Amino acid sequence: MALPDRRRINGPPGATAPPVFFSQRPPPPRLRAPDGLRKIFIKTSLTPPATGSAFFELSAPNTLKLSASVYGPRPLPPSAGFSPHARITAELKFAPFSTEGNRRGYVRDALERDLSAQLQIALASSVKTAAYPKSGIDVFVTVLDCEGSIEEGGEWLGCMQALAGAITCSSTAIADAGIECVDLVSAGIAAAVEKESGIELVMDPSPLDRYDIKAAVLVGYMAGRDELTLMWTKGDLEIVDETGKSGEFENVVDKAVGVATQMRAVLNEAVKERVVIGLEAVEKTAEKRKTVDEMNG
Amino acid sequence: MSTIDGSSSMGLSFPAQTFQKLSPSSYLLRHLQAKEPTRPSARAPEAFRSPTLHTNALSHAHGSAVVRAGDTAVVCGVRGEILSLTLGEGRTRGRIVVERNDRVGTSGEDEEIKTHSLLVPNLELGTGCSRDYHPGPPSDSAQSVAERLRSLLIKTTALIPASTLRIQDSEGETMAYWVLYIDVVCISLDGNIMDMAWASIVAALRSTRLPKAIWDVDKEQVLCDPDQMTYRPLEMRSLAFTASFCVYTYEGEDGEESWILSDPDEFEESVCVEKVLVCIKEGGMIAKIEKSGGLTDVMNMIPTCIQRAKKRYETWEMMLNEW
């Protein structure tokens, strides 16, 4: 906290530190099957002022929670100049209370800008931007609670998980907004972890599982078209093994795509739920109008 | 949302929503002048939106609350960090000595909160919660809401006594303080951010559990007990809740008519100029009354607001005690 932010209420001028405990007993690693995914809940339209919105949450004991809202297509300012395609912007922000360790400030830092850029890349190819010239589509994601730590030094799995949740949630929000899409994007993560028995491939690893991760891959996947919009890898993976066949890399990517496909099922359910509610509302107003007309003769 | 069905009952040739956009003031007036005064959201003028509360939903915060009423939703997280009173290293290491006025009354204690900024409330509206607020530095209106919340917390209600934030050694001397960072993030905004943000702050502080902190003489630092069973709640002075209103005035041929609307939503806030806020403490005591804009007769209007605010306090208190 070098310079106090003049526009916010600041803490004491001397630095404060998170509490230090006299004995660190980390919680025991959770045992989940390597192919077991964590349960996710997605709810749409929880932010009525926005054109579309979605809330993404992992069920207990996992704690990732984030909220996405989409505004658009809305006109670009005249200073922006003519653009035949819609301009998609994405902003991701961690709430100050969302992370372990130091409290995050309100000013965007490099990590959030990086994740925002990746989010924009993942979503941009899924939207039919040619259908909305001279328009802007804005996606805002707020991460309310991260699972585990997200500090860059070695704890990047937390960042990846937040980004994966953000991609799936934003795509749901875009669908909730009624924006024309080529397909919806869901994200999945898979990792190659070191165990006593050797290297094992794990689907949907969580920072709380405390695996010894050799490498991990995050994919943004459009299940309908079988296309990837984003791939982010960390760690060393072989592309081709000694015999010349495809190595670990392709296997891990396949696993990640498998996770993304299962996420897509939940995404579809969330979007369908909203469509069904909308159709029922339309039916109700049609019936009401019919009875009013009948009464008026 | 509107119960007035389409155009036929109003004698318009276009839908009600277009009327709302073309002439928002007349749209609201038509609703209020109906036989049974109502609002576009189908609420009665004296009706507040009923709130729901979830506490302790966040894993990295010492206390948290999610409050939702109608289409407005806020999340408040409270994190405690430690402010050590020993600064510097080596030769420049020195202690800050706290001199307390041990006067009877609360004003002596709360000087510590002001001097050291032990309570740090903040409000974030740039989360895509509404069309008007964009990510980035807070606008002037956002900063003013944050400052009003801080003033309510520290001056008006003095909710948290400094004694609950002190970390003392075995001789009772204060060696360090807990600093509470109270961050309110708005997820969805449909008017009346003040009431929701304040209620979420009170609920989050109520649910806060801080670790037991001990001053370690050898290491000269504060160490905490990781056992969650030793975490303690905060001491709080009396509960307090706010109620916001906006007043709509119409100058007709028969004179002036005015309506007091409880818990205004975004549309009503944009149409009405006059706003009132009443803060009620335990026992029905009035802690603060704020009024801005408009020229309505205060003597007739404020008692109604106070009555409604007292009832609203009971709703909030009941909701909080259920948790």
Image: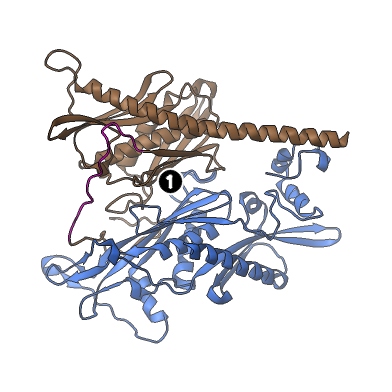
Quarter of the rendering occupied by the C terminus of chain A: top right
Residue segment shown in magenta: A23-38
Residue B104 x, y percent position in the rendering: 40, 87
What residue is at 77 percent from the left and 34 percent from the top? A289
- Horizontal side of residue A269 vs B293, given as left or right: left
Asked if B211 appears above or below B136 in the picture, the reply is below
- Find residue B314 and report its horizontal and vertical position in percent: 58, 67
Q: Is the magenta stretch mostly helix, strand or loop?
A: loop
Q: Position of residue B73 (x, y in %)?
A: 51, 51
- The colour with which the image depicts chain B is blue
Element at label 1: loop
Front-lying residue, B21 or B225:
B225
Give the chain of mark 1: B
- Residue at 22% of width from left, 23% of height from top? A249
User: Does residue A137 appear anywhere in the picture?
Assistant: no
Colour mapping used in the image: by chain
Q: In this view, does B301 lie to the left or right of B197?
A: right
Disc 1 designates what residue? Answer: B136
Binning the other alpha carbons within 10 Å of mark 1 as few (below 14), some (14 to 19) or many (20 upward) gives few
Q: The brown chain is which one?
A: A
Q: Quadrant of the N terminus of chain A?
A: bottom left
User: What's the residue at 70%, 39% (across, down)?
Assistant: B17
